[in-house]
Image (cartoon, rainbow, N blue to C red):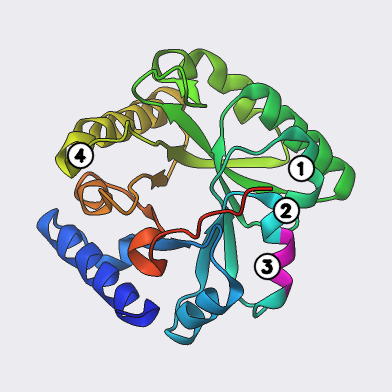
Amino acid sequence: MGVAENLERVREQIVAAGAKAGRTGNEIELVAITKTHPVEKVREAVEAGHTVFGESRVQEARAKIPELPSNLRWHFVGHLQKNKIRHALPLFELFHGVDSLALAQEMNRIAAEDGGHSRVLLEVNVAGEGTKFGFKAETLRTGLEPLLELPRLSIEGLMCIPPLADEAESSRNYFAQLRELRDSIEKEFDVKLPHLSMGMTHDFWIAVEEGATLVRVGTAIFGERPKRAKN
């Protein structure tokens, strides 16, 4: 199947999963992840009516975004390196993976210098994996106050990447943990964190059932990622 048909199938799955949880489809935004996929494939999604895309490498995004319609909305879904912040801030409307106070402070500093504001989600390492970035759930609360005080960042929710598993159902507990953490933080700090970014190609329907407002789907839309040529 082509990109348009894949998109339609993913949208249908989102609507069905939402309905199962008593939610409407328009409560969940599909972020089509385009990393390593060529501009031509992204255009197929645009022609099918999709406008929200995600990239995880700043350099790739800087080359790709100018080649596409200017009305598209771009999210950054990878680990943002500090030396790429200044290039990234003007390109993306939402950063899904702010994973440390130091990164947030640097984003705030550069946004202030450049006269901008950034919308961000805080990445939580829900399983405490040593190979993953993100705040530990149990320590996020103690580090939240200085994050909330950064005037150039708008913290709008949480994001997670559960451990990769063979069964989609294995992710459910981690998604529920993130939702419960968000709910408790909202009450404790009297803040609104409307977004939960969780769920990818292999488990996005489970994430929707557990409250995701943003799902990050690439392979199910664009197919397997092209292999990068070795130098």
**Residue at image mark 3:** 64
CA distance for labels 2 and 1: 8 Å
Q: Amino acid at mark 2?
A: Gln
Q: Which residue is mark 2?
A: 59
Q: Earlier in the sequence, mark 3 or mark 1?
A: 3
Residue at image coords 74%, 37%: 107
Q: Outermost residue toward the front? A: 231
Which amino acid, mark 4?
Asp
Q: Which residue is mark 1?
A: 84
Marks 2 and 1: which is nearer the front? Answer: 2
Q: Earlier in the sequence, mark 2 or mark 1?
A: 2
Q: Are marks 2 and 1 in contact (CB under 8 Å)?
A: yes
- Residue 166's label in the rendered image is 4
Q: CA distance from mark 2 to mark 3?
A: 9 Å
Secondary element type, mark 2: helix
Q: Which amino acid type corresponds to the residue marked 3 in the rendered image? A: Lys
